[in-house]
Image: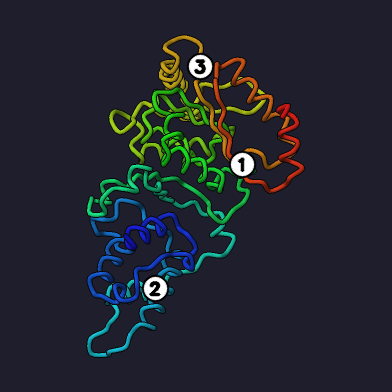
Amino acid sequence: MSLSLLTAQYFQQLDPHLLTFPEDKHLLHPTTQETIYNTLFSESHAANEQPLPPPAYRTRVLKRLITKLESLLSNPEEDEINESLLEEYSTLLTLPKPSSIEQAQQLTYITYTAPPEEDDHNSSPSLSETNKRRTILTSESRSAIITAGTTGHRTWEAALHLATYLSSTTAGKAHIAGKKVLELGAGTGMVSMFCARYLQPEVVVATDRELGLMRQIRDCAERNGLVGEGNGGGVFKGWIWEWGRELSRGSGEDDDDDDDDDDDDDELEKVGDGEKVEFDVALGADLIYDIDLVPLLVQTVKSLFEKYAVKEFLISATLRNERTFGAFLDACGA
């Protein structure tokens, strides 16, 4: 269990000081160290289905791991640190170190692992955890708050809470199963892609106003098996939507090719079976962060109910500023 947790935390790129290593007696065992190397650091090992974190992150994790292993050495004749781990650390130390600005602007693939479903808490731990893992890969700039004029290049806490509720509770899954779902301000697309991949919706449309974000979402949708047939392929869409305007049916892909745009529009029309596009449920996470955007947000939410037949809107918010949150509640008539 501890190695599974460590793997999930590592590919989500938690701060190295927050990583959960196996118990000391297990960590020092040669088999455990070999498994850690193969799973977390080997670029060629078959276990690595996800892209490895950037070198700077791997270096920090290895530094903490090796320091911990060194503190556990008590018998020089029997205890040792895995040679592959030491060689990898030495190799990483020789690489040029990017500046703090370069690290903040760098996009990297992040893999999120959903917590166990409610039924899984009582299941036998002997079941294959690997087969049951539900993961979604995103492309993010983890160190940046605002990049290219948008906050959407990282997955924020409210999105994690919303995805956890939807993915791990019976009530949450009932909001999505068999429904037409739209997400406002999808950002990295993590919530939308997870719903499309695992929660059996009729369709999920992730929306954002930034073309660059939609292109990143498209790339990640392919990596998550959401493009083409099977594994949720065809269920997931990405559309441009700037709040206060009409919903655009374009994904922003291949903008320089009119023929491609026409094909894309034809595909998106299928969402409503040739009729007016309607949705059952709308999602939003961490949308209430700027008091100047509250009127546009509320106007857009109202249009979801009035123009797109939305029946319920689930919103997850981090309370950063009580004045901003209060303005949202007032505008909603709460």
Q: Dot 2 surroundings within 10 Å: few (below 14), some, or many (20 or more)?
A: some
Q: Is residue 256 in view?
A: no
* Image coords of residue 67 (percent x, y): 41, 79
Q: Alpha-carbon distance for marks 3 and 2? A: 51 Å
Q: Quadrant of residue 76?
A: bottom left
User: Tag 2, which secondary structure?
Assistant: helix
Q: Quadrant of the C terminus?
A: top right
Q: Secondary structure at mark 3?
A: loop
Of residues 291 and 99, which is closer to you in this image? 291
Kind of residue at disc 3: Glu
Residue at the location (36% across, 36% down)?
A: 198
Color theme of the render: rainbow
Q: Which residue is mark 1?
A: 317
Give residue 125's position: percent from left, percent from top. 26, 54
Mark pair 1, 2: CA separation: 35 Å
Q: Is residue 157 left or right of residue 180?
A: right
Q: Is residue 182 above or below residue 83?
A: above
Under mark 2, the amino acid is Leu
Q: Which mark is residue 65?
A: 2
Which residue is labeled 3 in the image?
Answer: 278
